[in-house]
Image: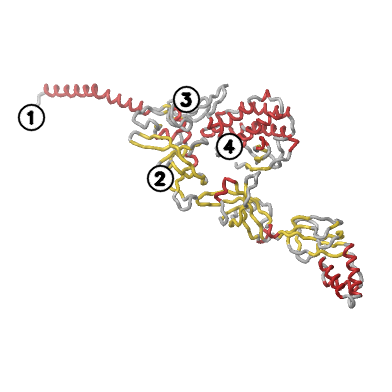
Amino acid sequence: MNIDKKTKILLGLTLVVGILLGALFFGGDSKEEEKTEVTSKTEVWTCSMHPQIRQPEPGDCPICGMDLIPLESGDDSIDPDAISMSESAMIIAGISTYKVGNTDGVKDISLNGKIEVNEKTVYSQSSHIPGRIEKIQVSFVGEYVKKGQVVAYIYSPDLASAQQELLEAYSVKDIQPQLFESVKMKLKNWKVSDATINTIISSGKTQDRFPIYADVSGYIIKKNVELGDYLQKGQTLYDVADLSTVWVLFEIYESDMSWVKKGDKINYTVASFPGETFSGTIAFIDPFINPITRIAKARVEVANVGLKFKPEMFVSGTLKTKIGGNKATLSVPKSAVMWTGKRSIVYIKNETDKGITFKLREVTLGPLLGNDYIIEEGLEIGEEIVANGTFNVDAAAQLAGKPSMMNIDGGRVSTGHNHGDATMVMSDDKKVVLKEDKTTISNEARKSLQPLYLNYFEFKDALTKDDFNSAKKALLAFEKSLNKINMSLFKKESHNAWMNYQTELKKQALHTTHVKNIKELRMSFEPMSNVMIAMTKAFNPLNETVYVQFCPMANSDKGANWLSKENKVVNPYFGISMLKCGEVKETIKNIK
């Protein structure tokens, strides 16, 4: 078919017009849809502590330095109690999840203890002869004595008279044989041997000194007499122990009592033998708890081949115990659980075609198994929960007015504090709970806490000396050091923990200038010490070992703790009047 030139031109113009009309009617909608899609994916990032901050991208809060969290986008189709979050936001916020499953229910219990002398092998060497020690053959603790060895020579006036009686009775033994036998028995009761008696009779002379022989072999653990001492019959010269077997005594805290049973196997290490692991079976558990330390002791009996184990060596043991017999149990990572003392919560992840959401759920916790909690109620196998970044999810829920740890019914809540000069406010839950969970902080944050500890220990030392002026000066310095700490150095979970510690410490230092006597200072020292102990366990900020010490009579006989750099007890609650009252309750070692 032939098409003329005019027709070709007409067809070309029609095609161009069609393309232009298509671009006019459809092209603009496409761009608008693309723009809308981009806009819908745009996220707003804010600070959990400063909700007025709004930024289009992740980063640090310009006020406190905390990591920003994504603000929930408006989507009416999701669960009204859930918080939505994109996958990219989850990655940036450090959120990871965990699928709930069964656990073997094995709980690891860490026990510390010491090697001690086996009390069954301890023997007290006594003198069967009254008199004065003329010569002593054992001179120091730790010396080995062998059974039958002469350990001392004694001069005894009573024994001298008895020997003279023996000679006289021997001279008339044919006439009075009973008298002779009676005198001999008297000497034998003083452990004088038949050979010695025969020697006295044959020589016709009395002896001035008589030997004391060791009744058993072993190592001297306590020496009770010295040369020249006068002894009564039956008086102890020294205590001796056979170290071929020893006891390993582990301390069991009251909270762990129900998990430790006689017959349990325990693996342990000895500080003196790094790299070696030993094992034993618990043979005995104290039927009583120490009323002051609140601990009982579990005993493991050990054969001490080659005297490898020395009494007073420190040991660390791990005991595994089964929770709930053979019953299947659920567990979740400790990092997944947020708790305030009254409730424990986790965040459940739900994923649909609408996106990813997280919803709060209360759970009932069972025992802690290492780094996992047993879940008694609240979760089912296969459910997915937030394992890391729970704090960020909860903060986002608070800002969005969804149910959260601090407001289980939902609704927008105050962030709990500000960073200006206003007084910091906490919920009642936070007031009573000082978490001690280990939380990583930076070296800069650790360094910023050093002046605070320096002032605390100066405060404590002044109280032990009843020095009111020095104690008040130290507490004022403590308050200044507290106000100088830059809170932006504490990130994520450590930031929230630090705010709790700081609030409680400020309460105690708030009215320092109005304190008039040392009694009022000591009233502040007790709650301050509780915070410092919790903070030390959580942050591990010190470069040295410190000790938690306890006085049962302080705080109106309720007992009170304090921190000390020395193992020796010097009581700050009573000062000079009861300086040594108390004991070391716990050791916090530098683990860096």
Q: Position of residue 138 (x, y in %)?
A: 80, 59
In the rendering, which numbered label is found on residue 1? 1
Q: Residue at x 65, y 56 (%)?
A: 247
Left or right for 380, reference 5: right
The residue singled out by tag 3 in the image is 51
Give 117 or 453, whichever is nearer the viewer.
117
Of callouts 2 and 1, the N-terminal one: 1
Q: Residue at x 56, y 25 (%)?
A: 424
In the rendering, which numbered label is found on residue 539? 4
The residue singled out by tag 2 in the image is 381
Of callouts 1 and 4, the N-terminal one: 1
Q: Quadrant of residue 307?
A: bottom right
Left or right for 577, reference 303: right
Q: Amino acid at mark 1?
A: Met
In the rendering, which numbered label is found on residue 537? none
**Residue furthest out toward the bottom:** 174
The label nearer to you, 4 versus 2, is 2
Label 2: few (<14), some (14–19) or many (≥20) C-alpha neighbours in 10 Å: few
